Amino acid sequence: MSRKLLTFNGGVHPEGHKDVSNATPIRLMPLLPRYLVALRQHIGGPARALVQAGDTVLRGQMIGAAEGYVSTAVHAPTSGRVLAVAPHEVPHPSGLADLCVVIESDGLDQAIEFQPLDWQALNPSALRNRIRDLGLAGLGGAVFPSFIKLNPEGAGIDTLILNGAECEPWITCDDRLMRERAAEILQGVAVMRHMLGAREVLIGIEDNKPEAIAALRAAVANEAEVVAVPTLYPTGGGKQLTYILTGRETPTGGRSTDVGVQVFNVGTAYALYRAVVLGEPMLSRVVTVTGHVATPGNYEVRLGTPVTDLLAAAGGALPGATGELVGGPMMGFDLEDRASPITKAVNCLIVKDRAHFPASPLILPCIRCGACARACPADLQPFEMYWFARAKDFGKSQSYDLFDCIECGCCTYVCPSHIPLVDFFRFAKSEIWERERHKQDADQARARHEFKAFRLEREKREKAGKLAAKVAENKARDAAAALGGAETASDPEAEHKKAILQAALERAKKAKESVTPQNTENLPPAVEKQIAEIEARRAGAEITQPETGNSPS
Ligand code: SF4
Ligand code: SF4
C-alpha cells in the first residue's frame, strides 16, 4: 500500500538545471600538493588545533579536537608536513577568515591505521564519542555535529527520515551518491537506527531522481521504505519533509525531534558508514561543480582542497564566467576568494554566467502584494518581517517568528519588487544574536561587579566587628587590672566590680563569636545565584571526592 503524502503550504518550482551535472559518475580528485583544513567546518565551536608548524602528519590523523559540547574533530586529508596554523579565507557568507591548518603533501598519502567500530557492542555513549572524534557532521548544509543528533536520550525518536530530496536547483551530489553507493548508505542508516532506537525508517527522494529511487529500492530489504515525494522546493527542509512523510507538524520554535522524528542527509549516512564500518574519519565529501565550467559533474574531494584546484579539475571556468556561488541559487552565497578550501559544508560550486545569473535587478518598494507570504513554506509573513528588519526594529521582526524562517529564499524568488528578503532576515537574526551576546556579557560583568562589592562590604564588616570585640576585650582587661589584687572574697564592693568585669568579658566574647556577614539581604538575584552556586560548590568539595570516568557524551 502506498503511503499517503501531505503537502506543505507555499513552495516554488524553480528551474532544476540538474542535468548539467548528474549524467556522469562521481570522479575522484587527484592528490594535491597543498591542503588548507579549516578548524571550524561545523556548527558550534571550532576544533582545537593539535598540531603546529613543522609537525608531520598522516592521512586520517586528528589535527583538531572537538572543543566544547557542540563541536567535532578535523583530520589531515593526506600525509605531509604542517606549514602553518593560521587564519585563511574560508567559504562563509560573512567572508571572514578563519583558522586553518596548512598541510604540504609528501606525495606518499600514508594513512594511520583505520579501526572499524564494533557498533553493536559499544555502549551508546562510547560510540557517540568515537563518532565525534571521527569528525562526523551533517552534510546536507547545516553541518551540525552528528554525534549530538544521534543521542536519543529523552527525545523519544520513533521515526528516522533519510533526506534524499535534494530540492535545491543545480545540486546533484546526493543524487549521484544514491545511484552509486546505495548499499553503503543503507549500512549507515542501520547504524543510525540502532543508535536512535527508531521503529520506522523512511527515505524521502524527490520524484525528479528516478535512478536514485530505483537504486535505493533495489538495495533496501525490509529495513526502510523508499518514498518518492513530489518535486517542490523546499521539500528537503527537515520540517517540510517530516510533514510530507508523517503528517507531523513541528511546533513553532521547535525541531522535528519534538514530534519523534530525526532527519539525516543521505551524505551523512554514507559518511557514517565509512566512519563506523571502515573506521575512516571524515576526510572527503562529494561536491557538485556545475554551471559555466568545462567539465561539470560530481567530484569526491578531500576536505581542505582549495577551490582553485577543484575548478581546475573540472576543466576550469569557461569564458564569460562571472564568479562562483557556494551552495545552490536559493540558499547559497557568493564565494569571496578562490583560494578558500572545501569544507564539510560545501555541497556545490556553481560557476555563474550572465545568462543564468543576470545582474541583480533594481529593488523597488514593497507593494504589499502578499506573494511572499503565499510562497513561504513556514507560514510566515515575510513582508512584515522585512518591514521591521529594515527599520531595525528587530524585536518586532522577532515577534513575527523570524527564527522559524529557514532562509529557503522562496519569498525573494517570487517578490515582484526584487527585494532580497532573505538578506534582511539573515541580517536581523545576526543582529539579535549579537545583541543577545552583548547582553549576556553585560549581565555577567554586572554580576561579577555586584559580587565583588558584596565581598568587600562583608570583609569590611567582619573587620569592624573583630575590632569592636577586641576593643571591648581590652577594656575589660584594663578594668580587671585596675581592680588589682586588693579585693577579697568577703568585700561586697570588690565582688560587685568582679561581676561587672565578668559580664563585660562575656559580652566581648559573644561579640567576637557573632561576627557574621550582615549584608546578605536584598541582594540582586544574579548575586544570590552566584553565592548559592559557590556555597553549593564549597559544600560539595567538603563532602565528596572528585568522580572519574564519565566524560560528557
Ligand atoms: S512579495 Fe515583495 S512586494 Fe509583495 S508583499 Fe512581499 S515583499 Fe512586498
Ligand atoms: S526565506 Fe523565510 S520567510 Fe522567506 S519563504 Fe523561506 S521561510 Fe519564509
Image (cartoon, rainbow, N blue to C red):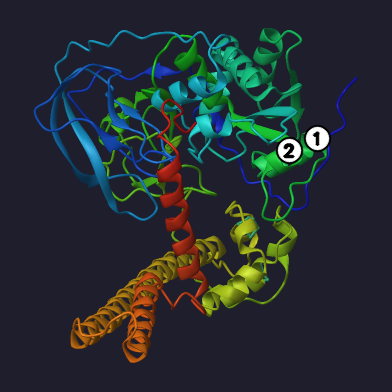
Instruction: Give the percent coordinates (x, y) of residue 421.
Output: 56, 65
Q: Name the quarter where the N terminus is drawn.
A: top right
In the image, is the residue at mark 1 within 8 Å of ligand 2 by its beta carbon?
Answer: no
Q: Which residue is mark 2?
A: 242
Specify few, some or many for label 2: CA neighbours under 10 Å numbering under 14, 14-19, or 20 or more: many
Between 174 and 413, the one lying in front of the other is 174
Residue at the spot 59% in from the left edge and 71% down from the top edge: 386
Instruction: Give the percent coordinates (x, y) of residue 281.
Output: 38, 20
Residue at the spot 39% in from the left edge and 15% down from the top edge: 280
Specify few, some or many for label 1: CA neighbours under 10 Å numbering under 14, 14-19, or 20 or more: some
Circles 1 and 2 in contact, beta carbons < 8 Å: yes
As drawn, the label of residue 151 is none
Q: Which residue is mark 1?
A: 246
Residue at the spot 74% in from the left edge and 47% down from the top edge: 250
| Amino acid on which the number 1 mark rests in the picture | Thr
SS assignment at label 2: helix
- The quarter of the picture where residue 194 lies is top right
Between 94 and 460, the one lying in front of the other is 460
Residue at the spot 60% in from the left edge and 38% down from the top edge: 16
| Amino acid on which the number 2 mark rests in the picture | Thr
Mark 1 vs mark 2, CA separation in Å: 6 Å
